[in-house]
C-alpha cells in the first residue's frame, strides 16, 4: 500500500469570500469551505478554525498555500512581505495575511496573487498545460490577471495588475453612470467591465441583464482592448478567461471576435487568425483554478522546505 500523500491547506483569499481547502492535490481535496470576507481578524480566525478542524479529521498539514486579492507584497525580504497593501477594500489595507497563519500552524507558506495562483492551477492541471507564456484573467467583482513566464508566476516590480490596463472609455448610449468605476483611474479595464462597474454603469446587475442588452457588446469590446495590449506586450501562447462575468452566454465568443478585429491582422499567427477559439478560452478547472493554484503554492512551499532541510 502506498503511503498517503502529504496534506496541505489552500486559501483563496477574495474580496467577498475566502475559499479554504485541505487536500493533497486537485483530485484529492478532502474539504472545501467558504468563509465570508468581513473584517480581517474575524475572517482569518474563521479560516484558521476551518483548517484546524480539517487537521483534526484528516491529519496534520505540511504547508499552506495562499492566493490573495491585492495588491500584495510578494518580496520575501520586505518588512511587509505577506501583507495585503493598498487595496481599495475597506478595512483590509495593510493587513498581514501570513503572520497569523505562521504563528498558528508553524508550517511553510506559499504566497502569491489570487490570479497568479489561478494561472499556476491552469498551467499544472487545466487549460494552460505546456503553453508558456500563459495569461489567466478573471472578470468578476473585480478584474485581475496572472502571468506565467518560464513556468513561474511573473512578479517583477510588484506583480501584474492587468485589471487596471488603460482602455478607451466606451460611449454606449443609455449608460446611467458613464465614469470609470475605479477609484484610482479614469479609464481602466476594471472600471468599466467588472461586475461592480457593470451594475453601476447600467443600474442593473449583469446577472439580471438579458443577453441582447447593449452592455454585453460594450464589455466584450472593452475586454478586447485589454487583451490586445496583453497580446502585444507579453505574446502569450494562450489567454484563459474566468470569473463570474465571463459566464454570460456568448460573451467569450464576442471577446474573441472583437480581439481579432482590433488586432486587424497585425499579429500574423495562426492561433489568432485561424484558431482564436483555442487561443482565448474558458478555464479548464472551471471555478477551481484559484483554489487548485493555492494548493499548488502550498505543495511548492512544502517541497522547497524539504529540499532546504536535506
Ligand atoms: Zn483602475
Image (cartoon, rainbow, N blue to C red):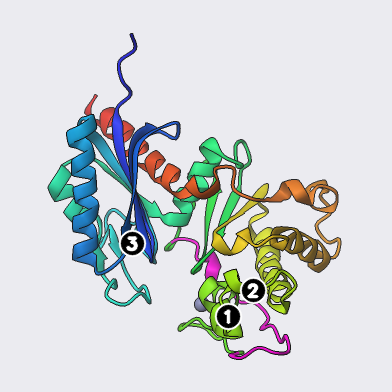
Q: Are marks 1 and 2 in contact (CB under 8 Å)?
A: yes
Helix, strand or loop status at disc 1? loop
Q: Which mark is residue 73?
A: 3
> Residue placed farthest to the top in the image?
1
Crowd band around label 3 with a 10 angstrom C-alpha radius: few (<14), some (14–19), many (20+): many
Query: Relative to residue 6, is residue 193 depicted above or below?
Result: below
Q: Give me the residue at 60% from left, 72% from top.
A: 208
Helix, strand or loop status at disc 2? loop
Q: Are marks 2 and 3 in contact (CB under 8 Å)?
A: no
Horizontal arrangement in the rendering, residue 143 relative to residue 92 (left or right): right
**Mark found first going from the N terminus, 3 or 1:** 3
C-alpha distance separating marks 2 and 3: 37 Å
Which residue is denoted by mark 2 in the rendering?
Answer: 209
Query: From the image, which quarter does the C terminus lie in?
Result: top left
Q: Position of residue 57 (x, y in %)?
A: 21, 33
**Mark found first going from the N terminus, 1 or 2:** 1
Helix, strand or loop status at disc 3? loop
Horizontal arrangement in the rendering, residue 136 relative to residue 96 (left or right): right
Identify the image quadrant of residue 204: bottom right
Q: Give me the residue at 28% from left, 43% from top.
A: 64
Q: Give me the residue at 68% from left, 81% from top.
A: 168
Q: Position of residue 169 (x, y in %)?
A: 66, 83
Which residue is denoted by mark 1 in the rendering?
Answer: 204
Query: Relative to the observer, which residue lies in front, 92 or 249?
Result: 249
**Mark found first going from the N terminus, 2 or 3:** 3
Q: Position of residue 199 (x, y in %)?
A: 55, 79
Query: Relative to the observer, which residue lies in front, 236 or 179?
Result: 179
C-alpha distance separating marks 3 and 1: 35 Å
Write down the region rendered in magenta: 159-177
Query: From the image, which quarter does the N terminus lie in?
Result: top left
**Does residue 165 appear anywhere in the picture?**
no
Amino acid at each position: 500500500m502506498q503511503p498517503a500523500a502529504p496534506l496541505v491547506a489552500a486559501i483563496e483569499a477574495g474580496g467577498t469570500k475566502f475559499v479554504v481547502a485541505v487536500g493533497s492535490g486537485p483530485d484529492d481535496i478532502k474539504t472545501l469551505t467558504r468563509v465570508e470576507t468581513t473584517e480581517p481578524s474575524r475572517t482569518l480566525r474563521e479560516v484558521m478554525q476551518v483548517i484546524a478542524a480539517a487537521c483534526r479529521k484528516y491529519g496534520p498539514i505540511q504547508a499552506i498555500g495562499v492566493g490573495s486579492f491585492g495588491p500584495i507584497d510578494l518580496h520575501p525580504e520586505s518588512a511587509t512581505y505577506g501583507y495585503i497593501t493598498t487595496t481599495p477594500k475597506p478595512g483590509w489595507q495593510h493587513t498581514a495575511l501570513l503572520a497569523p497563519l505562521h504563528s498558528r500552524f508553524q508550517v511553510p507558506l506559499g504566497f502569491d496573487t489570487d490570479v497568479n495562483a489561478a494561472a499556476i492551477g491552469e498551467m499544472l492541471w487545466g487549460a494552460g498545460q505546456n503553453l508558456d507564456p500563459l495569461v489567466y484573467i478573471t472578470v468578476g467583482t473585480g478584474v485581475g490577471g496572472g502571468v506565467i513566464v518560464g513556468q513561474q508566476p511573473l512578479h517583477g516590480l510588484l506583480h501584474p495588475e492587468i485589471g487596471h490596463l488603460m482602455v478607451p472609455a466606451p460611449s454606449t448610449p443609455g449608460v446611467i453612470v458613464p465614469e470609470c468605476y475605479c477609484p484610482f483611474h479614469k479609464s481602466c479595464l476594471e472600471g468599466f467591465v467588472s461586475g461592480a462597474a457593470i451594475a453601476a454603469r447600467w443600474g442593473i446587475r449583469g446577472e439580471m441583464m438579458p443577453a441582447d442588452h447593449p452592455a454585453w457588446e460594450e464589455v466584450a469590446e472593452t475586454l478586447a482592448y485589454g487583451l490586445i495590449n496583453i497580446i502585444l506586450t507579453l505574446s502569450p501562447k494562450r489567454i484563459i478567461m474566468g470569473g463570474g462575468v465571463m459566464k454570460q452566454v456568448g460573451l467569450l465568443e464576442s471577446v474573441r471576435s472583437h480581439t481579432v478585429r482590433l488586432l486587424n491582422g497585425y499579429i500574423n499567427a495562426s492561433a489568432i487568425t485561424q484558431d482564436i477559439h483555442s487561443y482565448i478560452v474558458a478555464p479548464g478547472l472551471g471555478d477551481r483554478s484559484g483554489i487548485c493554484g493555492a494548493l499548488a503554492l502550498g505543495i511548492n512551499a512544502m517541497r522547497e522546505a524539504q529540499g532546504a532541510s536535506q
